[in-house]
Image (cartoon, rainbow, N blue to C red):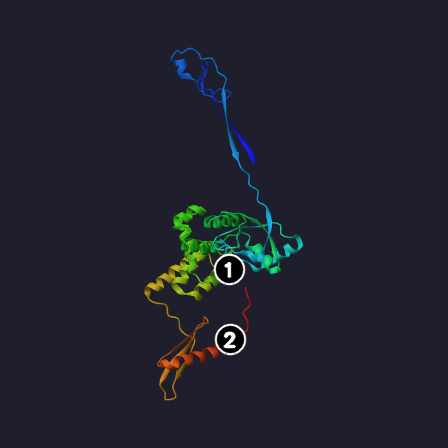
Amino acid sequence: MATKLNFTSKVRAGMAVERASAGERLADGDVVGIAQRDAGAAPVEQAEPQVEVAAVVETVTTHAVTRISVDDVVSNPYNPRAFYSAETIDELAESFASQGQITPILVTRLPQFPGKYVIVDGERRIRAARSRGDKLIDADVREGLDNQNLYLRAYHANKEREEQTVFDDALAWKKLLDDGVYVDQTELGIAVGEDPKHISKVISLTSLPPYLLQRMAQNRPDVGLGHAYNIKLIFDRAGASVAEHWLEQVIEGKASVRKLEAAASAEAGARRVGPRRTHYQSRVQFSRPDGVALGELKLFGDGRAELNLKGIAAADQQRLAERMKAVIDEWASEMEPVAAD
């Protein structure tokens, strides 16, 4: 326990002081009793200052680092980060191998996870430890943290390290509001120091497909909130394939925010005129042996395939579905695996 003394002084008796300038201050900082002088009061003999000492006791709490089981650690349910690079996890695992764990993870306990330690800060470190097959990890255990503290501590730690992105914020903020940790965007904005309008714009990004958000987060230096928000508008108005096109343009340095704004406005205008029609590249038609049409399969340039069948009896639908699944599964097994980004 450390004790700090905060000294305050107060002169209880007035002092009659003749000064050339009424605005001049005494060396000890006390104000002259000018009113007494002007009223002709007899000078008051200077009294010894009565010093009042206020002792402010500050308790310094130390947190001991302990070794805990990796299997007993669970992720922060309100982790402010959603996107992690596999490369950075691998680099950290290599650092563990050569230098050991330099910084302990910060964990707490929550009643909804009995017997477990919930990560406040250190998700990358626990992932690196698991990738190495470590059984134990150094941890700083803090008690009594609620869900807001659970989020805010991790949020500010990530901001200081510049690891946080608007794409992480989008998913985290939506969950915080969905779970009632904050009652509305205004309260959340106060907690994180952001304007509610900014909160609203960021959360709107969650309407994008997860793979698009992942792609944006991976290219954070090139894709900012202005880019992402306009791509979201384009996605809403023209669909995924058009949004993907513009995202690639941004990543390649060919599309500015202004250009995206123009594209989003153009898509809005096309939508007002009428629904966008995407023409198929090829079509396969099906019919029964007696010539009665059953439907068709349309193939589109953006990789989609649409099958539309009609006139199938209820008793035959399940059997048809099973056969179609078998055919598609066999076809999918022959496909070349897609390389990860």
SS at mark 1 in the image: helix
SS at mark 2 in the image: helix
Q: Position of residue 197 (x, y in %)?
A: 39, 50
- Residue 64 lies, with reference to residue 219, above or below; the image says above
**Mark 1 neighbour class, 10 Å CA radius: few under 14, some 14 to 19, many 20 or more:** some
**Mark 2 neighbour class, 10 Å CA radius: few under 14, some 14 to 19, many 20 or more:** few
Q: Position of residue 285 (x, y in %)?
A: 40, 81
Q: Position of residue 185 (x, y in %)?
A: 39, 50
Distance of label 2 from label 1 (alpha carbons): 30 Å
- Residue 332 lies, with reference to residue 225, above or below; the image says below
Q: Earlier in the sequence, mark 2 or mark 1?
A: 1
Q: Give the residue pinned by disc 2.
A: 332
Q: List the single residue furthest toward the left.
A: 273
Q: Position of residue 190 (x, y in %)?
A: 42, 46
Q: Amino acid at mark 1?
A: Ile
Residue occupying the point 60% across, 59% down: 90
Look at the image and tell me in which quarter the C terminus lies.
bottom right
Q: Give the residue pinned by disc 1.
A: 251
Which dot marks residue 273?
Answer: none
Q: Amino acid at mark 2?
A: Ala
Q: List the single residue furthest toward the front.
A: 115
Residue occupying the point 58% across, 54% down: 125
Look at the image and tell me in which quarter the N terminus lies.
top right
Between residues 163 and 111, which one lies in front from this camera angle?
111
Q: Nearer the viewer, mark 2 or mark 1?
A: 2
Between residues 225 and 151, which one lies in front from this camera angle?
151
- Residue 15 lies, with reference to residue 302, above or below; the image says above
